[in-house]
Image (tube, rainbow, N blue to C red):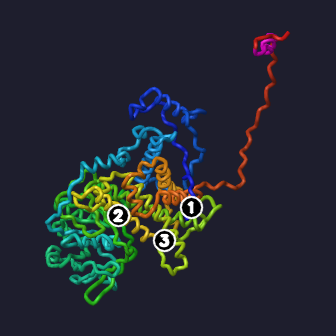
Amino acid sequence: MCPPSAPSPRLDPPPPPSPRLAEAVTDELDKAAARAYRLQYQSYRRGSATGVIGEAPDDPRRQLALDEDEEDSGHASTSEAAEVAFNELLEWRLEYQAYRAGAAKGAKGRASGKKWPLETLRMLPVARLAAHVRTQRKQLASAKSCIHAHVGCGRLGLGLVVPSLAKGCDKIILVQRPSAAWTLNEKVLEDGSQIACCVNSHKVLTLEVCSAADADVAERLSKSEHGLLLLSTSQKHMDAVASVATSSSVSLGPALAKGLEPLAAALRRKGSCLVCYAAENDHDAVERYAKTDVPFRLVPLLVDRVCTGRELTQSETGYVVDTTTEPWRGEIVVMRGEDDVDDGGAFPFGGEGVYRPPSAAAAQFLHRRKILTVNGTHTTLAFLTLAAKEPPPHKGLPKGDYELVRCIADENDDDFLDAEEAYRQVWCFAVARQLLLLFESDVEVAEAALAECDDDASSEVKREALVEALLSNARAAIERLGRGGDLTSRVLGAGVVKRYEGRLLPVAKFLECAALARSFMKTPLARLLLRKARLTETTLRLTVLGLTADAARFAEKTPDTSTPKTPPQSPRKAPKPPTPLSAKRRIQSSTNLFGMVPR
């Protein structure tokens, strides 16, 4: 049974707009009656007691306070900043759509008057479509040989990047500085031996260990079957790598600049530049590094796979490095820039989870899909857990830290019915987020990013493929995250209020407005997605609005029950005696309203 319908909480409106009217978007709004209506509406919004006919104020609601326990570094990451911008655009578009559908209230000012930066305006669907059409290019298969150098043999590099490189490269050079993590029995791995790179005990490829100071890297590479594990960053070895590599990648985390410096120095000595795919979660760090004087053309990668362990052991035939990851294959998305131009070189990555979008707009669509689907599902599970562990009448920030509820369970488990109900609610949120993603995007851009069809395929075939790709990814996200193990404190670590307002509330507002306007939900694409998801719009709306309304109590400010401090009373001066009136003033003061003087 679905939870009862409840209106989603609303926040206070932003400061009132300027009394001057913006340029009318249509001729109808430029007529005298329309201008009078808009002026009266602005008058009401600035505090007038009355407004236009049909206008009624919302019940006042205090602005939700930010979580006081949240650590604020003063610097938002690229993903966080983009999420805030998307939410601002969404709220403006929903209010404008509601007004066009007949609501008494509309968007608070035109988009041109919002003073949004150009990066925010580029997130509008029409702007994304224009950028996609302008920059899309066909990805041609290259016949060139691909010798790829990857710097950094951490868990993410070995668990996600290397398996993709094994399917797309001819030869690989894994560059790793000598360290204690790459020794056995306090000895460096033997030069010339074989090392099997495995993921979850499944062998991906076998490399030859190159650790001798006098090793000839180019010769050893040509004789190897798959490539080398180079346990050296010496000048001689780096010069050889710079001479043979056709592309490079890095996965070093905070050590990005320091770890790439030996290869960068070799490229400077050679006087050449190399494309470098940055498999880093911190895209801000990649952007800052790219702005320095480096001999790389940095290409950010959106990487998504949980890698939890790495073990180095010795075997009968050499060595084995086994990386432990989640069962899901993972994803790599090449984040193209607006002005990126393919250099015609061989693309080093291959495999099912690798996406090479044809345009920057398509790449941003895939990035937004990841934030909505994966991060959004994590947030939904966290608030679903809090709602179950701290039921009403609790209000305010959570008192405890809890393991996330499970959505995936065996029928024999005691909590199978609870898991089944949790899956139903999380699935509703996941489907709602796919609808929101399509609302924020242009269909042509979405199809270019996900619909793997022939160029001459019909629109029906492309949209069917797009919907299947979206729902398959949503199911995978629930399968990944719905098995428990994580904690509410970690998932909501950026702030309970921040995550509620940024990732739960916008979905509810979208469905609430969609129920009023109904224009988007009536489109063939939205109806197809709901049909494939086996959900009705009513079920979707009741489930999403129900949990959002319940979760709002965790974002409320708890009242201060401590004894209030009485402010010190300032000493009051004794009042001065009244000044006696003269005879003339006494007569004037006794004059009544009609100007008559009593006799």
As helix, strand or loop, the secondary structure at mark 2 comes to helix
* Circle 1 Cα neighbour tier, 10 Å, few/some/many (<14 / 14–19 / ≥20): some
Q: Are marks 1 and 2 in contact (CB under 8 Å)?
A: no
Residue 142 pos. (x, y %): 16, 64
Residue topped by disc 2: 468
Q: Quadrant of the C terminus?
A: top right
Nearest to the observer: residue 232 or residue 556: 556
* Residue 377 drawn above or below residue 183: above
Q: Which residue is under mark 3? A: 407
Q: Look at the magenta stretch and give its main secondary structure.
A: helix
Residue 77 can be seen, yes or no: no
What residue is disc 1 on? 3
Badge 1 element = loop
Q: Position of residue 581 (x, y in %)?
A: 80, 15
Q: Which of label 2 and label 3 is nearer to you?
A: 2
Mark 2 is on which residue type? Glu
Circle 3/circle 1 CB separation < 8 Å? no
Can you see residue 573?
yes
Q: Quadrant of residue 282?
A: bottom left
**Left or right, 111 with reference to 266:** right
Amino acid carrying label 3: it is Cys
Residue nearest the viewer, comparing 289 with 14? 14
Q: Earlier in the sequence, mark 1 or mark 2?
A: 1
Q: Amino acid at mark 1?
A: Pro
| Residue 553: in magenta span | no
Q: Nearer the viewer, residue 309 or 216?
A: 309
**Residue 587 among those drawn in magenta:** yes
Query: Which of the image's four quarters has the N terminus?
Result: bottom right
Q: Earlier in the sequence, mark 3 or mark 1?
A: 1
Residue furthest bottom as drawn: 316
Give the magenta part as a residue range.
Answer: 583-593
Q: How far is mark 3 from mark 1, CA to CA?
A: 18 Å
